[in-house]
Amino acid sequence: MSSDSGHERAPEILMYNEPIVPADFDLPQALETARLRLRPLTIHHAVRDYDAVMTSEQRLRKVYDPGGDWPRGLTLEQNIIELGWHQTEFQLRTSFAYTVLSPDESEVMGCMYIYPTRKSGYDVEITMWVRQSRVDEGLDQHLFEAVEAWIAERWPFVNPAYPGRRIAFDEWRALPTV
């Protein structure tokens, strides 16, 4: 991407600025079921996360943006940068990213994200995915059900949105912003 001066300009990266939970809210550090564990996503997960992303490339495009091309071209270095961003936002309480791990924590099986939203009627946007190799096991539905219950029980959100699950992405994108 070039600027008017002819110099290359870095792509814009969205980083959230306002906390989405109160300062005194005790942030959940884990969700555990017999089939998975959620832990805050950090740069320490970068190599295993990268493997999960790149082996699920086609699935991720369908889950998040059928017209998009992410994660095509993603490098391990860029993934480390992105995970560092997620880790920083978690510390600042402006968004929350969790890695989905196998019960023994040896495999990254996906991710779950809680982002602020400006969509009318909702206070946060929650998305998640599991790696392609785990879809046929029903892990995606298990993750969604576990996360939905966890959010309702442990988090202070009044009306979380689940785009692509409780509301179709096309409907989500068409909602007015506030």
Image (tube, rainbow, N blue to C red):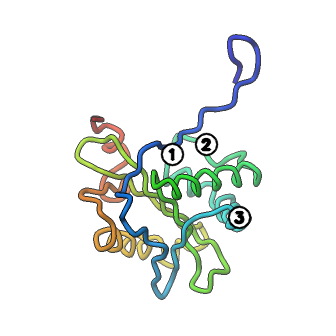
In terms of sequence position, does the residue under pointer 2 or pointer 3 come before the other?
3
Name the mark nearer the viewer: 1 or 3: 3
Q: Quick check: 104 left or right of 37?
A: right
**Where is mark 2, residue-wise?**
69
The reply to whether dot 2 and dot 3 touch (C-beta < 8 Å) is no
Across and down, in percent, residue 54 comes to 69, 58
**Where, by quadrant of the figure, is residue 60 drawn?**
bottom right
Mark 1 element type = loop
Q: Quadrant of the N terminus?
A: top right
Mark 1 to mark 3: distance in Å? Answer: 21 Å
Across and down, in percent, residue 117 comes to 36, 45
**Where is mark 1, residue-wise?**
66
**Where is mark 3, residue-wise?**
51
Type of the residue with mark 1:
Pro
Q: Is residue 31 above or below residue 118?
A: below
Type of the residue with mark 3:
Asp
Mark 3 element type = helix
